[in-house]
Amino acid sequence: MNLHSPHRVNVLLVDDRPENLVALEAILNSPSYNLVQANSGAEALRCLLNEDFAVILLDVQMPGMDGFETATLIRSRDRSRSTPIIFITAFSSNDTHVFKGYSLGAVDYLFKPLEPEILTSKVGVFVELFQKTVEVKQQATQLAAVNSELSKSEERFRTLCACSPLGIYLADVEGRCTYINPRCQAICGLTLEESLAEIWQREVHPEDRERVVADWLAWIKEGHEYSNEFRLASSESVRWINVQSSPMFSDLGKLIGHVGTVRDVTDRKQAEEERSRLIREQVARQEAERANQMKDEFLAILSHELRTPLNAILGWSRLLRTKRFDQETIDKALETIERNAKSQAQLIEDILDVSRILRGKLNLNMHPIRLESAIKLAIDSLQPLTEEKSIVVELTCSPNVGEVIGDPDRLQQIVWNLLSNAIKFSPQEGKVEVRLESVGDEAHIQIIDSGIGIAPDFLPYVFDRFRQADSSTTRSYGGLGLGLAIVRHLVDLHGGKVDAENNPGEGAKFTVALPITKRKTASAGDDWSSLKDATEVLPTLANLQLLVVDDDDDTREFLIALLEDEGAMVRSAASVAGALDALESYSPDLLLSDIGMPEADGYELIAQVREMERLRGGKMPAIALTAYAREEERQQALEAGFQMHLSKPVDITKLIATIANLTGRLGNPPPTDILHHAQEQARCLFHKE
């Protein structure tokens, strides 16, 4: 048996019967254990001479030297005095043996036949304890070595100052050296009758030279005490020196010169740099460990939050397919499926927003708008949630609150995130207050709930990404801990600030402060609420010829059913090849295509469509409807030739309005630059492009 296997912990198995040793080895077989067998007490003692063991499994009944005698000898040796011993015996009824074993320092007493789970568990505990003990010893040794090296560096510096003479110089009132000792000359090359300013110009490191000469000339002129540290650069090395100097006065108080000392402090500087490096490494290690823990907690929460609504969706879907329910139950099931699907979509959107924030890809489309409209839209969108918990939302808007410059969709998202957070933490039949008022040159949005409030020790971290006051499996509230971090970043992008505090009494209060624009009147088309109203009554798509391309059968059939219900005449294809075949004899008013498809993707399709149009004339509007929702993917779709990029799951109203807009059904004249027009309409009309 190899006793020197690296990265493995030694476990000693002592038994005079080979079959028992084989059984123990089979139970404890593990890549992290180095199982060492001994057939007698004497052989066990030989194994312990030069090796350390995490635990010893010792049979009591052995010929010659039994387990008790072996244990006594093991305990008599310094190296093995504290090694854990587990006695194994078949005599379970003899209490005397048990007491004797414990009196000899045994940590446990197991009876044959052995339970594998119990044996594995007990050995695992002592192996883990041994590993941690070894790790602590190694860390202590490393720390002692580092401290020893630092102490030696400091000791060398102290010895240098105490035993070696300092460099000493005298200078006249003009700064010319009148005396130097050999040590001073050795350190910095000073010579008699030479000006210190000239020496500094020659010897000081180029990066320090201008500062040192300026400081020295100023000190000579003022006649005060001087102290400075800087580098000397020679052809062989760079050294740090400490220069101190004081003015010398005659009995009459007249300045007659200067006396100074020069010390080589290179060792101290290196020691300080080493100490700083160790501190930086320690801080970086702690930050990495904290970030790793937060990552693990976030991934666990993410899995839970995505699987929970999925469970309801799949569960009700399976029940609706396999069982017959009355209409009320069916309506309830469909409502549950839709609510959980929206919950999953919001989780994915939050993750994408954080990704955009981390990559600096979160762009804003800024307009002068009134915050009241964004607040009301956010409140309206959360009405089902407030009704479910019987929560009253009270909105108070002060008159004449000015406009702010902001992205309408993102401002609504700020209010939505804060308001949904307040609703989540408010009790049943609670109350949430939303206030809008002017404070100086800022517009303040306050959202006050009647919930549990924020733990004081968590309050400084409430806007951090992936941070939650309770990330345990028994937490009462769901979520990924991203909403408030997104709020803070969006508010920062708008030039504002957001604060959180505990409301006196109960609940929490969040305040968003945004700068009010100086513009007094709104120009036509700037009122975002009026643009939103344009989509409240959507036109039909009657008689529009549409081509839908998607390799996913369920998505394709859903789109066909939706668009035909709106009056459109729809043809479909499951691949790029099928779409091109259809276009040979079919000229649709608009193309609606997926991006990710097998064999050829949507980018290849739009490229071939645009080439066909170049040869035939005309230009067909095209929408990319895809699950690739990042900003760079949206930009890639537009650059490839699509006029609009919509992400899955698509909002039905948004899809219909986009089709109507691109085909001129919203009353807009056909644009000369359809790409530019579609992008501008989308930015104004829709949320989170």
Image (cartoon, rainbow, N blue to C red):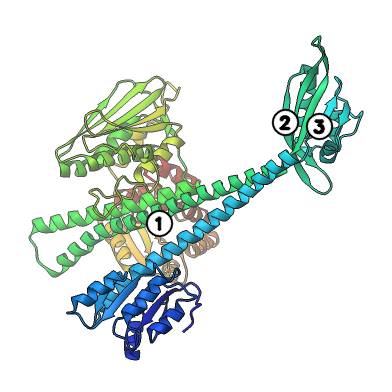
Q: Which residue is mark 2?
A: 228
The residue depicted at 36 percent of the width and 57 percent of the height is: 299
Q: Earlier in the sequence, mark 1 or mark 2?
A: 2
Residue 563 in sight: no
Q: Nearer the viewer, residue 664 or 575?
A: 575
Is label 1 or label 2 in front? 2
The residue depicted at 37 percent of the width and 26 percent of the height is: 443
Rendering quarter of residue 387:
top left
Residue 635, compared with residue 17, is above or below; it is: above
- For this orientation, the residue located farthest to the top is 252
Rendering quarter of residue 525:
top left
Task: Give residue 239's mark.
Answer: none
> Callout 2 environment at 10 Å: few (<14), some (14 to 19), or many (20+)?
few
Badge 3 marks a residue whose secondary structure is strand
Q: Amino acid at mark 3?
A: Ile
Q: Nearer the viewer, residue 173 or 413?
A: 173
Q: Position of residue 550 (x, y in %)?
A: 38, 65
User: How far separated are the C-alphas under marks 1 and 2?
Assistant: 77 Å
The residue depicted at 33 percent of the width and 46 percent of the height is: 468
Q: Position of residue 13 (x, y in %)?
A: 37, 81
- For this orientation, the residue located farthest to the right is 193
Badge 1 marks a residue whose secondary structure is strand
Q: Earlier in the sequence, mark 3 or mark 2?
A: 3
Q: Are marks 1 and 2 in contact (CB under 8 Å)?
A: no
Q: Amino acid at mark 2?
A: Asn
> Callout 3 environment at 10 Å: few (<14), some (14 to 19), or many (20+)?
many
User: How far separated are the C-alphas under marks 3 and 1?
Assistant: 90 Å
Task: Give residue 590's mark.
Answer: 1
Residue 86 in sight: yes
Q: Which residue is mark 3?
A: 168
Q: Nearer the viewer, residue 47 or 478?
A: 47
